Image: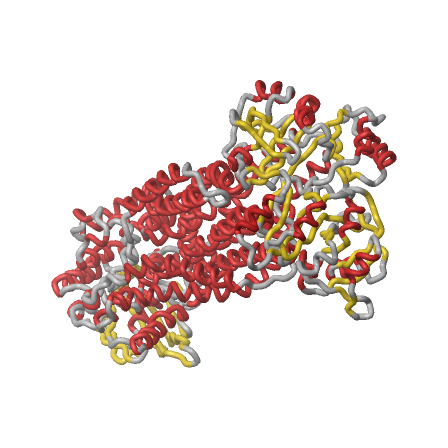
């Protein structure tokens, strides 16, 4: 205890006072690491809030169920409820149906509608509802007794201005129906699912609305406490073909797994800012260790052990980590409010629907942020602390000039750097775990480290080439940069990291967008897309009615009709969509974006129904590829087709398998349609004409979107998704600019004597400023050039390794020369602007100090 | 005939703010130094030697009073004027040599001329001449870290002379040298004064330069307490 107190006292006197005395530099580094930590923490908090809300919602909807009975296409026979209730292993059984509906005419505010049997459901889920007069009533009796009544969640009722007794029109695939609000759910238990944006109806009312008579989505079971394995086996034996008994965590696990890759990628991207901040900490601790060498020698001569010196500098790193984290937390709470909306919308659009009910600062995330920030700062201080502990006590007598240690030789570092870069390539080829591209990330880290290690050697080479050209300020600047050692190179390393990340992401996002553009133009070709109402929200679970299908077959407007039938299936736990459509008209009007296999040979076979094509995501996730056999249990039939080829597809909820509709109908004659796309002759006015005809003949039972609007909306979602990425990139660049500021300021401050000597021998202030500016330009030039090279390599990793390992897809490689051409000079200008504070420091101390300092 | 004074100071004062108080560097001195003089400035630490030298070198500005060096009014000079003054009028020699570590001996010597915009070839020729005179030719491509203290100070003297200034200011030029090298440096400065008629001002604690002095000035607490003119 006494030793700790003594150390803390020394730390305060030796380290903290020094940091306070040079608070300008310390604050800049704190800003850098704090900003990095804030971005990382707020991104994690945003994703965590979204996932927590999703998880809570799923748990609340699952209630106390121990097991759920489900069917592959979501249609469990309702007749199964009675035998299950009677089964000795079952304590309670309750059927559940869910779908999304929307207030009539309000496309933006769809919400979850839950159909239950109010009596059977009592043991399963707890909820209470209040009447207008505030008394709790048995709303479940009203739901049962009065058809077309609903109990609305508190948030939903508040948003839509509903009150008990109101009549509200709702829209669903099967049309529109008026409901009476029988009560408002109390903000507790089930009332909190979906952040209170849900409504409960009686099962019969639900079936009336959706037309799904005789089937339920699932049956929740509570098992008896003493249930044996034999009982469970007997229970499972009750299930008809296609129906299975599962644990209730499946939906949550599937949803969380879908978001995991997105969460990891965003976390890694946000960690980049913290990684860049690490360079800043290294830079300042290294400066302190070098410039305070005489003081360290004094401490050593007075009895301080090397270990204590090491601890002092590690302590400096820890202080930056702790204060940076303390700064990051309040910044995160502000930043998360801006990020949360974008992140939750992205997750809702791409993966699973989330409704954020509350934003809690997860202690786990806050703790993780603390450990990571302090860990990163301590890791950054490690090498300078090791250098500091090597100072010998005898140096107190030698009065050696105060110069920064050059650290390990530039050539040795460069060899290490080349080694890292070369090691990244084979590492990237190792397959990662599903959704966790660990080898890809390690390869990325090796690339960053490799290029950072190359920078001292790069500065030497660059300096060597220019050392004898130009005027005096230029030559002096180049010589200084050439000989300045590892510490200068650290800032170049930070800039390389930020520029590389920027370049790689610009290329990746551009390649992704261009490929998606090709995909929406070819695979999502068509002039009008028609589906049952809310089909998109409920993932095309409902079929078009026979009447509507008949209308489509007998339209007067001339159009090529391409209907489709989608099944949402799983292959060994991997969710995917089987989509069957008539290939002859589709391939005449549109095409797939081919990835593997000879398109010219595959198309005819596909038209003839001789096989299927699978998406790259499906192939990567399941391991099934061209030449393999695709097999799927559709409930009433099992289909088996050879896989003819692999295509690119960018739907985010798993892979897709495309088959010919006639081939499907041969196996499942009454498969029905989940939607239709129309191709019109070269006449844009025809789209509106077709719409009008469909409305006139089908009423408002169908959702319709023009092909142009659909493609446009997909690209808008795409752009919105990457808006968060852009913010993270800008922060990483800002932190790198802070690195340039710190380095140049430190270089200026430690050279005050040299700069004043130049002034004394006739150099003008302008010449000296130009010299500093040239130094900045050299650092920035090398950082930019190496960053660009690293960025191009990294873009390959992102597109062909990390995206493949995270999401299962790759893109057609395209470089956005225009964006790079515009932004690279902008980054150069920003980095050079970061030199301004250093320029201001040049003459902070009067030149006369040359004569006073001996 | 007595030569014209190259340095004229009257009521020269330099006060440094220090927190809420002030430190007096020079308390208002009067001074006239003739062209070709070899002045030895003496005094204990804090007496004002370096302050006076900084003002004479155009590295600092007086708080009050008049200072004219080689016909240039330094009290009212702007930054650009002071830069030109430092290039054309004074050459500085420091105790710590203050050579730039990334430049060779030849480059260090050349730098004031190149900063002043002199042609490179002419500058290198002049630098070579100076190095030859100082016996430094064999070391012309060496870096400062490869030189002895005496060699570094000879390099610094060559650098002070490259622009051919009429005044040489030396701040404790022997402070970091052994006695033999210290004597050699003082002999060099005296030679400059005697043969080339440079005005040389040496601020020093030691008595090593006393035999060569034409003027001895003793400073104490920012004031001249003794100024004796040798014949």
Taking A582 as reference, is A46 above or below it?
A: below
Q: Position of residue A117 (x, y in %)?
A: 74, 54
Query: Which corner quadrant of the image does residue A331 belong to?
Result: bottom right
Residue A701 relative to residue B60: left or right: right
In the image as oriented, which residue stretches furthest toward the left?
B180
From what the image shows, is residue B14 above or below residue A752?
below
Residue A495 vs A333, above or below: the answer is above
Q: Nearer the viewer, residue A697 or A178?
A: A178
Residue displayed at 39% across by 37% down: A425
> What percent of the width, then of the height, locates residue A601?
57, 18
Q: From the image, which quarter does the C terminus of chain A lie in?
A: bottom left
Q: Can you tell which quarter of the image residue A388 is in?
A: bottom left
Left or right: B12 in relation to B204: right
Please say whether residue A615 is visible from this viewpoint.
Answer: yes
Q: Quick one: A651 or A243, which is closer to the camera?
A: A243
User: Number of numbered discs present?
Assistant: 0
User: Residue A767: where, in percent of width, then height?
Assistant: 41, 53
| Colouring scheme, one of rainbow, by chain, secondary structure, one colour | secondary structure
Looking at the image, which is closer to me, A412 or A677? A677
Quadrant including the N terminus of chain A: bottom left
* Residue found at x 56% / y 29%: A630
Q: Is residue A537 visible?
A: no
Q: Quadrant of residue A839?
A: bottom left
Residue A831 horizontal side relative to residue A136, left or right:
left
Place of residue B135 in the rendered image (x, y in percent of width and height, measured from the top left): 16, 51
């Amino acid at each position: 205890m006494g030793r700790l107190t003594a150390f803390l006292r020394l730390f305060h006197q030796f380290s903290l006072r020094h940091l306070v005395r040079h608070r300008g530099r310390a604050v800049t580094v704190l800003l850098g690491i704090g900003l990095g930590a804030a971005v990382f923490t707020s991104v994690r908090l945003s994703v965590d809030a979204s996932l927590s809300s999703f998880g809570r919602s799923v748990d609340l909807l699952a209630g106390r169920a121990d097991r759920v009975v489900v069917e592959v296409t979501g249609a469990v026979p309702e007749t199964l409820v009675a035998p299950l209730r009677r089964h000795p292993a079952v304590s309670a059984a309750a059927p559940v149906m869910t779908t999304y509906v929307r207030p009539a005419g309000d496309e933006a505010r769809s919400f979850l509608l839950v159909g239950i049997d109010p009596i059977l459901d009592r043991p399963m889920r707890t909820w209470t509802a209040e009447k207008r007069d505030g008394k709790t009533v048995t709303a479940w009796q009203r739901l049962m007794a009065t058809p077309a009544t609903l109990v609305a969640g508190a948030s939903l009722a508040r948003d839509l201005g509903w009150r008990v007794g109101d009549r509200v029109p709702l829209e669903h695939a099967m049309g529109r129906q008026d409901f009476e609000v029988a009560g408002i759910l109390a903000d507790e238990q089930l009332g909190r699912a979906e952040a209170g944006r849900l409504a409960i109806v009686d099962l019969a009312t639900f079936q009336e609305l959706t037309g799904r008579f005789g089937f339920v989505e699932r049956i929740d079971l509570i098992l008896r406490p003493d249930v044996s394995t034999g009982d469970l086996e007997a229970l499972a034996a009750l299930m008809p073909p296609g129906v299975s008994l599962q644990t209730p965590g499946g939906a949550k696990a599937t949803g969380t797994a879908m978001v995991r890759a997105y969460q990891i990628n965003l976390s890694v991207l946000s960690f980049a800012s913290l990684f860049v901040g690490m360079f800043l900490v290294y830079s300042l601790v290294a400066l302190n260790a070098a410039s305070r060498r005489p003081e360290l020698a004094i401490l050593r001569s007075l009895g301080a052990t090397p270990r204590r010196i090491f601890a002092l500098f590690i302590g400096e790193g820890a202080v930056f980590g702790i204060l940076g984290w303390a700064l990051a937390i309040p910044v995160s709470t502000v930043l998360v409010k801006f990020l949360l909306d974008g992140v939750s919308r992205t997750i809702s659009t791409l993966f699973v629907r989330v409704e954020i009910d509350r934003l809690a600062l997860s202690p786990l995330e806050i703790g993780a942020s603390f450990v990571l920030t302090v860990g990163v700062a301590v890791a950054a201080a490690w090498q300078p602390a090791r250098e500091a502990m090597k100072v010998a006590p005898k140096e107190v007598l030698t009065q050696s000039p105060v110069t920064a240690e050059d650290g390990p030789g530039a050539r040795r570092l460069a060899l290490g750097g080349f080694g890292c870069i070369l090691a990244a390539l084979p590492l990237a080829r190792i397959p990662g775990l599903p959704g966790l591209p660990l080898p890809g990330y390690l390869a990325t880290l090796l690339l960053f480290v490799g290029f950072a290690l190359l920078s001292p050697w790069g500065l030497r080479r660059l300096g060597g080439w220019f050392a004898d050209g130009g005027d005096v300020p230029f030559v002096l600047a180049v010589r200084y940069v050439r000989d300045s050692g590892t510490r200068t190179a650290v800032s170049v390393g930070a800039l390389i990291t930020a520029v590389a990340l920027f370049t790689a992401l610009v290329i990746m996002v551009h390649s992704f967008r261009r490929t998606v553009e090709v995909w929406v133009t070819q695979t999502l070709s068509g002039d009008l897309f028609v589906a049952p109402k809310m089909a998109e929200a409920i993932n095309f679970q409902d079929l078009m009615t026979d009447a509507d299908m008949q209308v489509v077959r007998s339209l007067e407007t001339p159009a090529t009709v391409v209907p489709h039938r989608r099944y949402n299936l799983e292959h060994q736990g991997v969710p995917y969509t089987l989509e069957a459509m008539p290939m002859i008209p589709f391939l005449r009007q549109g095409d797939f974006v081919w990835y593997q296999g000879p398109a010219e040979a595959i198309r005819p076979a596909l038209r003839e129904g001789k096989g299927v094509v699978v998406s790259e995501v499906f192939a990567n996730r399941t391991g099934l590829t061209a030449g393999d056999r695709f097999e799927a249990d559709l409930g009433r039939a099992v289909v088996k087709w050879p896989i003819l080829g692999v295509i690119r597809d960018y739907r985010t909820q798993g892979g897709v398998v495309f088959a010919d509709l006639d081939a499907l109908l041969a196996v499942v004659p009454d498969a029905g349609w989940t939607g239709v796309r129309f191709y019109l002759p070269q006449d844009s006015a025809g789209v509106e004409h077709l719409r009008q005809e469909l409305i006139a003949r089908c009423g408002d039972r169908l959702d319709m979107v023009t092909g142009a609007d659909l493609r446009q909306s997909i690209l808008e979602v795409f752009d919105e998704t990457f808006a968060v990425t852009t913010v993270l990139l800008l922060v990483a660049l800002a932190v790198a600019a802070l690195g340039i500021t710190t380095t140049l300021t430190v270089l200026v401050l430690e050279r005050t004597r040299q700069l004043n000597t130049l002034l004394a021998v006739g150099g003008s202030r302008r010449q000296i400023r130009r010299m500093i500016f040239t130094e900045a330009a050299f650092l920035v030039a090398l950082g930019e050039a190496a960053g660009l090279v690293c960025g191009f390599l990294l873009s390959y990793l992102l597109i062909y390794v990390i995206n493949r390992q995270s999401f299962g897809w790759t893109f057609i490689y395209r470089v956005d020369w225009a964006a790079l051409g515009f932004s690279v000079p902008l980054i150069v200008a920003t980095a050079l602007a970061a030199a301004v504070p250093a320029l201001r420091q040049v003459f902070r101390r009067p030149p006369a100090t040359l004569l006073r300092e001996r | 005939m007595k030569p014209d004074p190259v340095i004229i100071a009257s009521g020269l004062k330099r006060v440094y703010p220090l927190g809420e108080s002030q430190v007096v560097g020079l308390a208002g001195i009067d001074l006239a130094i003739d062209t070709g003089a070899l002045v030895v400035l003496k005094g204990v630490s804090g007496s004002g030697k370096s302050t006076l030298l900084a003002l004479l070198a155009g590295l600092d500005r007086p708080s009050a009073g008049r200072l004219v060096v080689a016909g240039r009014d330094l009290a009212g000079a702007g930054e650009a004027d002071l830069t030109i003054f430092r290039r054309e009028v004074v050459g500085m020699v420091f105790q710590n040599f203050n050579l730039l570590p990334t430049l060779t001996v030849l480059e260090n010597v050349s730098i004031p001329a190149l900063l002043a915009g002199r042609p490179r070839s002419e500058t290198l020729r002049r630098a070579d001449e100076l190095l030859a005179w100082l016996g430094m030719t064999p070391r012309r491509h060496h870096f400062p870290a490869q030189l002895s203290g005496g060699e570094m100070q000879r390099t610094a003297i060559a650098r002070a002379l490259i622009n051919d200034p009429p005044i040489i200011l030396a701040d404790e030029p022997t402070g970091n040298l052994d006695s033999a090298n210290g004597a050699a440096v003082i002999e060099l400065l005296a030679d400059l004064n005697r043969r080339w008629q440079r005005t040389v001002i040496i601020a020093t604690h030691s008595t090593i330069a006393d035999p060569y002095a034409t003027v001895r000035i003793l400073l104490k607490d920012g004031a001249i307490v003794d100024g004796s003119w040798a014949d």
